[in-house]
Amino acid sequence: MIPKRLSIAMVTALLAACASLPVYNAPFADMDQNGDGVVEWHEFKTHFPEADPKVFLEADRNKNGEITPDEWQSFVDQ
């Protein structure tokens, strides 16, 4: 059995770690800097400087190097 103090410390550490994770829920238009209707990696990275390329690839459902509004909405809704 884990002592109560250790449990509280573990939960606190977990919550602190989660709080520092980037939140990817920006409006699509805010990310689409040039207004061409898609978000490319450089636009995504500008909006989310700490972003991991894996996140971009996850949002880019058809893997064509661009995130469409529909792809972004699906990603945010998951």
Image: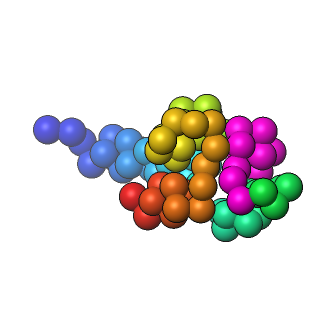
Residue 70 percent coordinates (x, y)? 52, 62
Image quadrant for the N terminus? top left
**Badge count:** 0
Question: Is residue 28 shown in magenta?
Answer: no
Residue 53, compared with residue 15, is above or below; it is above
Residue at the image position 57 percent from the left and 46 percent from the top: 21
Residue 15 visible within the image: yes
Residue extending farthest top: 53
Q: Which region of the structure is painted magenta?
A: 37-50
Q: Foreground: 52 or 1? A: 52
Image quadrant for the C terminus? bottom left
Question: Is residue 47 shown in magenta?
Answer: yes
Residue at the image position 71 percent from the left and 38 percent from the top: 41
Q: Foreground: 22 or 37? A: 37
Q: Foreground: 56 or 25? A: 56
Residue 49 percent coordinates (x, y)? 76, 41
Residue extending farthest right: 34
Residue 20 visible within the image: no
Q: Foreground: 65 or 21? A: 65
Left or right of residue 3: residue 55: right
Residue 69 percent coordinates (x, y)? 59, 62
Residue 67, compared with residue 56, is above or below; it is below
Splitting the image into 4 quarters, where does residue 10 fall?
top left
Left or right of residue 41: residue 17: left
Residue 70, compared with residue 54, is above or below; it is below
Residue at the image position 52 percent from the left and 46 percent from the top: 59
Residue 49, compared with residue 24, is above or below; it is above
How was this image coloured?
Answer: rainbow
Left or right of residue 38: residue 21: left
Residue at the image position 67 percent from the left and 67 percent from the top: 27
